[in-house]
Image (cartoon, rainbow, N blue to C red):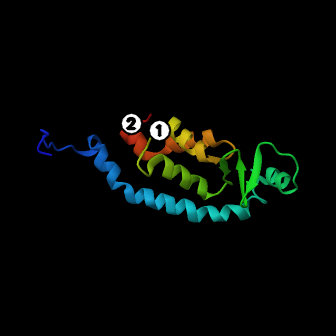
Amino acid sequence: MQKFTFVLKHKSGKQNKVANALSRRLALLATLQFEITSLEHLRALYAEAEDFKEDWEKCMSMQSNVDFHIQEGYLFQGNQLCVSRTSLREQILRELHGGGLNGHVGRDKTISLVSDRYYWPQLKRDVGKFVQRCPVCQTEKGGT
């Protein structure tokens, strides 16, 4: 450390992104715990979910369905977990938009984060509405 010259300067709020990321570590752990425990309930919902009922039935009856498949009781479209219309969707949006290390990343980045792991019809529309209603984004970013 003696080889280096450095100056300590105070950075407050948004400017101190590294400290902010470190303080969000507990939120990240909570997100992982949330995802592991809440997803168990999805298995029972697919057969009755209006968004996925038809695809679920095709997969269960072994009919050819190129887009969807069942793995360990969960319905997937490609590599994306299908999420029925439940409060779990909003929780996923809340965590991926404003939780973890990212923190209110905007519509396009949120769409990317959600669609990397999850699928439901009208996902882009739902994310857009969620970000548009986000009070933090509206306050901090002047309504964009």
> Comparing marks 1 and 2, which lies closer to the viewer?
1
C-alpha separation, residue under disc 1 versus residue under disc 2: 10 Å
Tag 1: amino acid: Gly
Q: Position of residue 25 (x, y in %)?
A: 38, 56
Residue named by callout 1: 106
Q: Earlier in the sequence, mark 1 or mark 2?
A: 1
Instruction: State the image coordinates of residue 61 (x, y, percent, origin top left).
Output: 88, 56
Return the x and y of residue 53 as percentages of the image width and height: 79, 54
111 horizontally vs 14: left or right: right
Q: Quadrant of residue 3?
A: top left
Identify the residue position indicated by label 2 in the image: 141
Q: Residue at x 64, y 65 (%)?
A: 40
Assign the C terminus to one quadrant of the image: top left
Crowding at dot 1, Cα within 10 Å, few <14 / some 14-19 / many 20+, comes out as some
* Mark count: 2
CB-based contact (under 8 Å), mark 1 and mark 2: yes
Going by the numbered disc 2, the residue's amino acid type is Lys
Decide which of 78, 137 is in the foreground and name it: 78
Left or right, 68 with respect to 14, comes to right
Q: Report whether 5 appears left or right of 70.
A: left
Q: Quarter-wise, where is residue 78 in the image?
A: top right
